[in-house]
Amino acid sequence: MSGNTYPSVNDLTLEEKASLTSGGDAWHLQGIESKGIPGYMITDGPHGLRKSLASSTGETDLNDSVPATCFPPAAGLSSSWNPELIHKVGEAMGEECIQEKVAVILGPGVNIKRNPLGGRCFEYWSEDPYLAGHEAVGIVAGVQSKGVGTSLKHFAANNQETDRLRISANISQRALREIYFPAFEYIVKTAQPWTIMCSYNRINGVHSAQNRWLLTDVLRDEWGFKGIVMSDWGADHDRVASLNAGLNLEMPPSYTDDQIVYAARDGRIQPEQLDRMAQGMIDLANKTRAAMSIDGYRFDVDAHDEVAHQAAVESMVLLKNDDAILPVAKDAKIAVIGEFARTPRYQGGGSSHITPTKMTSFLDTLTARGIDAQFAPGFTLDLEPADKALEVEAVETAKNADVVLMFLGLPEAAESEGFDRETLDIPAKQIELLEAVAAANKNIAVVLSNGSVVSVAPWAANAKGVLESWLLGQAGGAALADVIFGEASPSGKLAQSIPMSINDDPSMINWPGEEGHVDYGEGVFVGYRYYDTYGKAVDYPFGYGLSYATFELSGIKAEKTGVNTARVSVTVANTSDVDAAETVQVYVAPGKAAVARPRHELKGFRKVFLKGGESAEISFDLDERAFAYWSEKFDDWRVEAGEYGIEVGTSSRDIAGVVTVALDGDGKTEPLTEWSTFGEWSCDPVGSKVVSAMYEAGGNGELPKLPDNDMMRMFLNSTPINSMSTIVGEGGKRIAAFMLDEYAKLAK
């Protein structure tokens, strides 16, 4: 055996191969010391390193971990729309893993925010799969550039916490392919994550860990995934079935390696399959060996805190800014109301809970920067009733201020891994406090802290400004001060629509399911795909976000670059004297289609930083997938011939201009049969020739004539040709036989 590489699977006994397919303990891979294979550590992410202080013993304590940089969770970072910044976050996370000898960090989580009540929305990226994939890929590529692995999760359709360990997500093939798979697919094809974590839930009745179609047919054979698949913690319920399906690693160990050994001996597991799964684990050890061999490395705490700071600045979304209440002058008389200003909620609860290297609140930052402000907590960060004394103090504090900064949001008890929320509303006592303060002072800017969207419309009339800050990580205090006092312009855009009511969300009719299953009845109409297609009013649309600057988009052009590809260009200008960033968004709007398609879908975006008065021309290349839908009929992607609108704007509802391109389509046709309708025959390139021949034969008396009026043509077009006798009588069978014979000749 060479000293530079680990052994191949051929060097191992059956028992050793089996052992590699299960963890050593809750936080370590299984090593084989005698063969030089180490049992490297793996830990939770996804927005920073959560290495448990008890991990060396294999125990789990979610709130007891080594200090690490707490970056903004995906709820905020996704609103940056800045893949380059996200890549920097990934690089920093990778460096921290090297210091702590962590070979794989468990994240990012790219499950779709199907419903804003989802308990883990704070650590997922978006309601849109294109945005989720093109942002989260930065975490994967950034971490792995440092020689440390990531675990893309949770594959797939893990979109709720209710009954998450066993719920069956019943989803159409089209919805899987267009909504719930693409973020995973893009990251796999672009960055090859070293590991993927399968989800707890079942998909159409089959546990993800035992789903060969999911883990092998799609992930490996279609997408070309080269890494290993591990289970979520406790998601493997049948080790033999899971290994056969393509699961390399059970986590944590159930100490049942003998099940694999027995199955391999009696033929229930083929030797080649066990070898593939075990070799994947050896390959993972090889990939991480160089980084895990670095001794004495120490990451730059201050530099990483600065990355977290910039990420927090770009995560904030300015929703409302009447009378330019923001930014605030530093010499203004400022009242700060709300416990979140003193005790920030900077991350979500559950397995991603990090011990930060630093922590600075907004009030701490004001003190450090010499900015005078009067503070009143106003309420407690729990779900207990309002404290009237705190309310009175807050109103008195606000009375004589030039501006009131009210910090409102969701306490940790209101959202976390492990349960789904029951309402979009923030606690009633906070709304009552806002109303009381507004009665004393109208100059209020609300700063929100929450991991998923909250209702804004019911209380927004009491605030001139609303700044959605999400969960900002450890540097949120300084970042908030930068934005609130104008040292940086807000540049975040919503990665998630804010509905007027939770009952407007199309998934609510099937949320959160019943009797062990949840039907994804809305299909591909998730988030803005539903709201925009059906003209549903929203409070704030997907992609929305204000700035202290003003921008203009002009010169929108599109050109066809291939049979089914195009390039679109646009000039974006900063028409103010404020240096700031605008995110240009490109949506594709299909014309008439064979299936129900959303009105438009995000297919490109670019964040452009411009100085005051500066402009830039940017372009986007749209590939064939940008125009495609998944056809269950063809079991493949389809691009239909026709005109497509290309919309360029700054949100899904703020479209600056639309240009069209005419595409040739992919030319795919399905073989015609007696069960194909007359309309399908008429639209098919070969079938249309047969139909013409049939009409000609009818005209010269060889065949019966078809009825020639609008009503009968309508019935005829929807009728399979084997049922034409219902329209033309006995002659229908002769017509069908003629058509099938002619088709057989022409289709040769």
Image: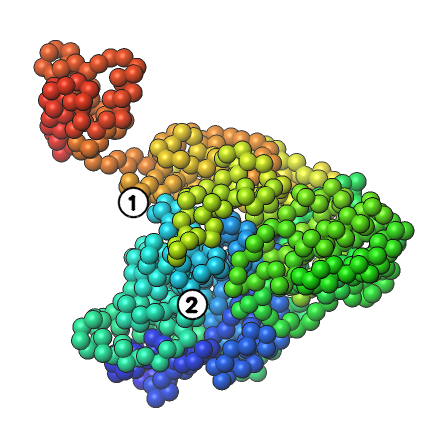
Question: Residue at image x 63%, y 51%?
Answer: 425
**Structural distance between the alpha carbons of marks 2 and 1:** 29 Å
For disc 2, the marked residue is: 232
**Crowdedness of circle 1 by 10 Å Cα count: few (<14), some, many (20+)?**
few
Asked if the residue at tag 1 contacts the one at tag 2, i.e. Cβ–Cβ closer than 8 Å, the answer is no
Asked if residue 283 shows in the view, the reply is no
Number of marks in the rendered image: 2
In the image, residue 460 lies at what x, y percent?
71, 44
Question: Residue at image x 41%, y 48%?
Answer: 520
- Left or right for 596, reference 17: right
Q: Please identify the residue farthest to the top as the structure is shown.
A: 700
- Left or right for 508, reference 31: right
Mark 1 residue type:
Asp
**Crowdedness of circle 2 by 10 Å Cα count: few (<14), some, many (20+)?**
many
In the image, residue 370 lies at what x, y percent?
85, 63
- In the image, 633 versus 146, the foreground residue is 633
In the image, residue 145 lies at what x, y percent?
50, 66
The answer to which image quadrant residue 517 occupies is bottom left
Which label's residue is closer to the chain start, 2 or 1? 2
Q: Which mark is residue 635?
A: 1
